[in-house]
Amino acid sequence: MVSRFERRKDTVQELTESGAEHVGRIAMIIAGAVRDITREIGDWISDGIEMQEASRRAREDARRTSADDDTDTPDPES
């Protein structure tokens, strides 16, 4: 027959192991969420950088096209 002390010890041990397992799972969930959030923020910033670069290239193309049009058009006063 198991003593009252041993039953209590076994109960405390089971509760501690169960608690540690659940805390570990919760920590993994939180770590995964932080990883996913970080990835999304990084992707969002990358999208912004790509849009900024595309806008800069479009402005440069517009300036080049405008400059080309000015040189190709004969001066009406000449």
Image (cartoon, rainbow, N blue to C red):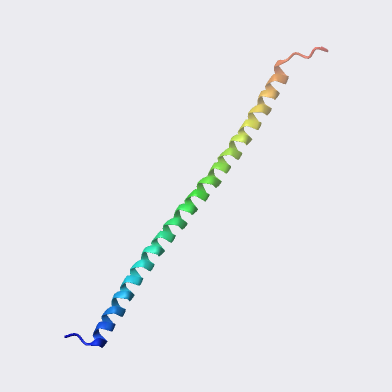
Residue 74 in the image, given as x and y percentages of width and height: 75, 13
Q: How many marks?
A: 0
Horizontal arrangement in the rendering, residue 14 relative to residue 33 (left or right): left
Position of 5 relative to 50 (above/below)? below
In the image, what residue occupies the spot 31% across and 73% down? 17
In the image, what residue occupies the spot 29% across and 75% down? 14
In the image, what residue occupies the spot 68% across and 28% down? 63
* Screen quadrant of the C terminus: top right
Comparing 26 with 31, the one in front is: 26
* Screen quadrant of the N terminus: bottom left
In this view, which residue lies farthest toward the right? 77
- Residue 55, quarter of the rendered image: top right
Horizontal arrangement in the rendering, residue 43 relative to residue 65 (left or right): left
Residue 70 in the image, given as x and y percentages of width and height: 73, 20
Residue 15 in the image, given as x and y percentages of width and height: 32, 75
Position of 7 relative to 78 (above/below)? below
In the image, what residue occupies the spot 70% across and 24% down? 66
Horizontal arrangement in the rendering, residue 62 relative to residue 15 (left or right): right
Residue 76 in the image, given as x and y percentages of width and height: 80, 12
Comparing 42 with 12, the one in front is: 12
- Residue 28, quarter of the rendered image: bottom left
Position of 6 relative to 33 (above/below)? below
